[in-house]
Amino acid sequence: MKYSPPFTVTEYITVLVGEVCELVGRVEALNAKALTAPHLRRENRIRTIHSTLAIEQNTLTLEQVTAVIEGKRVLGSPIEIREVQNAYEAYELMLRLDPESVDDLLTAHGLMMKGLVREAGRFRSGGVGVFEGTRLVHIAPPAGLVPEHVGNLFAWYRESGLHVLVKSAVFHYEFEFIHPFSDGNGRIGRMWHSLLLGQWREIFFWLPVEELIQSRQKEYYDALGKADREAECSSFVELMLEVIRDSLREF
């Protein structure tokens, strides 16, 4: 039996997909030059890195993150500085990654978590849980099942006839549910979501979607938790489509 994530296309999802597609067309038509401007791409990339790390409790400011990426000395935690350097290196590789390749996923994790965790670039060898404070909110599948689960998820994505906007969000949720790595699952999951979207429309390589996820961080984690409880991720897909829509509106 083929793997199929528990998911329903709601009426609201259909409406949001239509809105996002219309906005993508408008942005591409009206801002074609802006999309290719190196300074804007760099600025948005830095905002993306700052936001995705801030979600993971990195305390460096946008100005400090910019300085680190520019090679300047910054007063801050060496670990947080390393997180910025690693994330920049991983995102710089984005255009050369195949979003449907498990090997490329491991390569990206190796860059993102280099010098931060022992198993950088490898699936976790032990159990892992997700905590909200001291409360355990999610127990990930056993480590021995991770390669199979990840392989099934990638195969489902390749074969699914769902719109990219929908199936990339489903992939994002399922990736976080599997929690394939000992650490770095959130930042890699968000990066991979953008990579999947970028394969569809190039604008998503440069759109700082992570910035709006950070602004709605509680909703983001609440939607992940709700999907876990209900064993159905439609509400998470709706939230991600809202975030993408609002990111395009801001752009």
Image: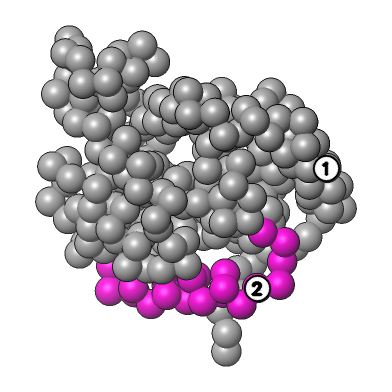
Instruction: For label 2, count other residues whose C-alpha is less than 10 Å away and answer few (under 14), some (14-19) or many (20+).
Output: few
Q: Which residue is mark 1?
A: 22
Relative to 74, say whether 178 is above or below: below
Q: Of the residues tagged 1 and 2, which is closer to the observer?
A: 1
Give the residues in magenta: 142-164
Q: Which residue is mark 2?
A: 160
Q: Main secondary structure of the magenta part?
A: helix
Question: Does 210 sit left or right of 126 as displayed?
Answer: right
Which residue is at 17% across, 55% downward? 119
Instruction: For label 1, count other residues whose C-alpha is less than 10 Å away and answer few (under 14), some (14-19) or many (20+).
Output: few
Dividing the picture into quadrants, the one containing residue 66 is top left
Question: Does 20 sit left or right of 107 as displayed?
Answer: right
- In which quadrant will I find the N terminus? bottom right
Question: Does 32 sit left or right of 23 as displayed?
Answer: left
Residue 209 included in the magenta stretch of the image: no
Foreground of the two, 72 or 38: 38
Count of labels shown? 2
| Amino acid on which the number 1 mark rests in the picture | Glu
Residue 149 included in the magenta stretch of the image: yes
Secondary element under disc 1, as helix, strand or loop, is helix
Q: Which mark is residue 248?
A: none
Marks 1 and 2 sit apart, C-alpha to C-alpha, by: 23 Å
Which residue is at 70% across, 30% downward? 31
Q: Position of residue 125 (x, y in %)?
A: 20, 64
Can the viewer see residue 224?
A: no
| Amino acid on which the number 2 mark rests in the picture | Ser
Foreground of the two, 152 or 178: 152
Question: Does 138 sit left or right of 66 as displayed?
Answer: right
Q: Position of residue 14 (x, y in %)?
A: 83, 53
Secondary element under disc 2, as helix, strand or loop, is loop
Can the viewer see residue 40?
A: yes
